[in-house]
Image: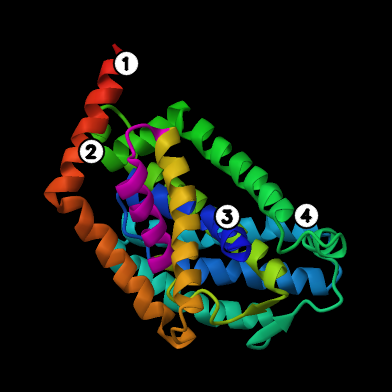
Amino acid sequence: MVIAAELGLIYAILAIGVYLTYRVLDFPDLTVDGSFTTGAALSAVLIVSGTPIWVALIVSIVGGMAAGVVTGLLHVWGNINPLLAGILTQIALYSINLRIMGKANVPLLRQSTLMTPLREAGLLGTWGAVAIFAVVVAIVGAAVYGFLGTGFGVAIRATGDNELMARSQGVNTGVTKVAGLAISNGLVALCGAFMAQYQGYADISMGIGLIVAGLASVIIGQAIFGMTAVWQAVLAAVLGSVIYRAVIQLALNAGLNPNDMKMISAVIVVIALVLPQWSVFKKIRHRRRRVMAAEAV
């Protein structure tokens, strides 16, 4: 389960990015599958070429943000449906990522990465690495929480909550949508860069189906932990990512075919969406809200 915890924490950065679009901005963004690979591709290619690791990470984030901006502009300026805008960007990114990599797979063998010190110290695959990854995710989560508390962050939240009301208050909802998508896909690309360095290679197909994993993490976290406050929602997305990876690991340990993991992921999302609608879970949520309201008083 240590490996599941490591993967869950790495993918938690992606889950936070998906939370920004899916919950905060109320934008069903399918760019994720492409921007994740963009982050991995840029990171791998730059590291192989001798670029400093931190520079490679920054470029990866910028590449992901650029993908988010394209999706936002297609929707805002092109007046294209959000789902279609994300799909169009995702399709274009496949060719772009292939151009960046030059081939379908870029190995990072014998290259110095962020994971090299952990691997040399024998920490990868141990709870020590899990603790380090948890600190990194905590920093990212705190940064997102702090940003959403700023004036511009509140404007993004208002856009997702009620776009007409936000516009009537003088918020440029087009700008907030583009910015929200850029930040979200920047986080997704950062996750892709970390993942490429963790597994030791970048592959053109590594981002396929990851939107399902991101949604599963957010939905599982919401169903179990609730999302009353922003900090709680961010924490729920992180914990949901860890739980999701743990479930996948349990399925593999039970002897299920790895080729069925995409189907299992879809089933997990369906279960996470359906269970909260059952009366027993509704009662639990109502009881939790009453307790929190009483504590607030």
Q: What residue is at 27 percent from the left and 24 percent from the top?
A: 291
Residue drawn at (33%, 67%) of the image:
268
Tell me if 5 is positioned left or right of 237 in this view: right
Mark 3 residue element:
helix
Tell me the SS state at disc 1: helix
Q: Which of marks 1 and 3 is nearer the N terminus?
A: 3
Q: Give the residue number, with chain letter if any, for mark 4.
A: 54
Q: Name the residue under label 3.
A: 9
For the residues marked 3 and 2, what is the alpha-carbon distance in whole angstroms? 26 Å
Among the two numbered marks 4 and 2 on one chain, the one whose residue lies closer to the N terminus:
4
Q: Which of marks 3 and 2 is in front?
A: 2
Q: Give the range drawn in magenta.
A: 212-230
Q: Residues within 10 Å of mark 2 (few under 14, many from 20)?
A: some
Q: In this view, does 217 lie above or below 266?
A: above
Q: Quadrant of residue 142?
A: top right
Q: Is the magenta stretch mostly helix, strand or loop?
A: helix
1 vs 4, front mark: 1
Q: Position of residue 275 (x, y in %)?
A: 21, 56
Residue 45 versus residue 127 in the image, above or below: below
Q: Earlier in the sequence, mark 3 or mark 4?
A: 3
| Real-space Cα separation, disc 4 to disc 2, in angstroms | 42 Å
Label 1 – label 4 distance at C-alpha: 43 Å
The numbered disc on residue 296 is 1
> Circle 2 is placed at which residue position?
285
**First-in-chain label (3 vs 2):** 3
